[in-house]
Amino acid sequence: MKSRTRNVLIIFGAAIVLAVGLVISCGTKQLGYSVETVKAEKGSISNTVTATGTIEAIKTVTVGTQVSGTIEEIFVDFNSHVKKGQLLARIDETALQAQASQTAAQVASAKAELTYQKATFERTKALWDKQLISRDDFDQAQYNLSRTEASFKMAESEHQRSLTNLSYATIYSPIDGVVLNRAVDEGQTVAASFNTPELFSIANDLTQMEVQADVDEADIGQVKLGQKVSFTVDAFPDDNFEGDVSQVRLKPTTTSNVVTYTVIINAPNPKLKLMPGMTANITIVTEKSDNTVLLATKAMKFWPADSLMGPGRTASRTADTGNLCTIWLYDGSNFKPKQVVTGINDGTNIEVISGLEGGEDIIVEITKSAAGNGSSSSPFMPKRPSGGKNTKNSEPPRS
C-alpha cells in the first residue's frame, strides 16, 4: 500500500551522482579486460518513509445547542473570524421565557406554603411543650414542615434549570477562531431531545495546522518524534511544506486487512495556503547524513574471480559482518581490498563512515572484452620490463 522511497539529497546545490566510469589501463586493453569502477564522492544521503494524510486544524470545536427551538437570528457566517464570548446565534425564547415564568410562580407558591408550615409547626411545638396535644399531632406538624421545605428546594431547582435553559437560547463562541461550518439557517427548528445539534464548527488557529498521516505498519517502526517531514498538496504542487512528527498514536486502523497507524505532524501555515481537509503527500526523513562519503551499493557486491588473481592465488571471500564491508580499490593497474564501515543505505547508494576519503575508484565489475586476444592471463599481473609481456612464471602484484 505504501512504498518506501530512498533519496539522495543535493549538496551545495548540485546533483550528486556517483559517476560510473570505464577505466581501462593500457595493460588491460592489451589483454582484453575492462574494469568498471565507481568513484566515491561526498554528498548527502537519507532514508525516508512516504505516506498520505489529511490536513486538519489543531483544535476544532463543534458548537451546538442544549435546548430545542427555532433559530431566530444568526450573526456569523462561513469564514467569519470570531472572538471567545462573541454572539453567534439566538434561538426563539418565547417558550423558554414562559417556562421560566411558570417555575418562578411555583417557587413563590412553595415559599408561601413553607412560611405557613413553619408557623404551624411553631404553634404545635408550643402546645406540645405544654403537653396539650398528642405526640401524633406534633409528629404530623414536623413532617408537614419537612415536606414543604423539600418542595420549596425542588421548586427553586426547577426554576434555576429553566433560567439555565433560557440562557442556552443565546449561542456564544467558546474560543477565538474561524467559522469553518454553519449548519443551520434562520427559521430552522433544532431539536435537542437526544443528541446535541451541531450549529457551527470553529477552528481556533489556521496559521498552525496538523497533518494526520496514515503510515503502514511495515514503516511505523522507523518513525520517531521530532523527525523532519516535507509534504505537498495538490492545490500547490510547486510548493514544498515542512513540519515535524509530534505524535505517533498506538491505536491501529485496519482497512481491507491493511494495518496503518496515525502519525500527527505539526505544519506551520503562516501564508494560510493549507486548508482543512486537503490531502497531503508526505515524506518523513527517518535518517539523514550530510557531507559524507557516498558509494554505489553495487560496489559492495563485487568480489574478483580467482582467475583474475594469477596462478596459484585465490581471492577467498570473507563474510561481511554488521556495518563492516570489503570493497576493492583500483589505481589503473592494480587492485586491492579495503575494509570500510558503512552507514545509511538508500538502496542505490550507501554511506561510508570510515575507510574512504572520497575520490577513490572502486571496482564494480571486471569483464573480458570481446575485442580481446583470448589471453587468460590476469590483467593485474605485473609486466616484465622487456617487451611488457607476462610469462607463465610471473607473479601478480600483492594486494
Image (cartoon, grey):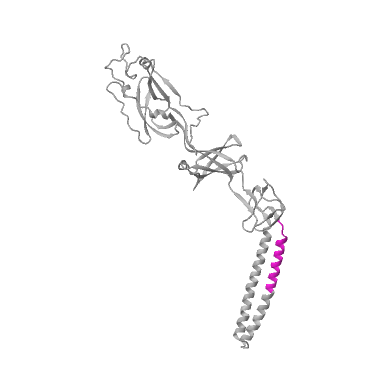
Please state which of residues 349 and 360 is positioned toward the viewer in this rendering: 349
The number of numbered badges drawn on the structure is 0
Q: Which residue is drawn at 64% across and 83% down?
A: 124
- Picture residue at 63% right of the left edge, 77% below the top: 145
Query: Can residue 324 be seen from the camera position used here?
Result: yes
> In the rendered image, is residue 174 in sight?
no
| Residue furthest front in the image | 256
86 to 217, vertically: above or below: below
Side of 305 where 42 appears, left or right: right
Q: Does the magenta stretch include residue 101?
A: yes
Q: Where is residue 171 in the image (x, y as percent from the top left)?
A: 67, 55
User: In the image, which residues are magenta?
Assistant: 91-111
| Residue 255 percent coordinates (x, y) | 51, 45
Q: Is residue 50 magenta?
A: no
Report x, y in % for residue 234: 59, 36
Work out which residue is located at the far top of the displayed protein and give it: 387
Horizontal arrangement in the rendering, residue 171 relative to residue 218 (left or right): right
The quarter holding residue 372 reads top left
Residue at x-position 68% and y-position 76%: 115
Residue in the image at 70% along x and 64% along y: 99
Placement of 253 over or under 112, stated as above or below: above
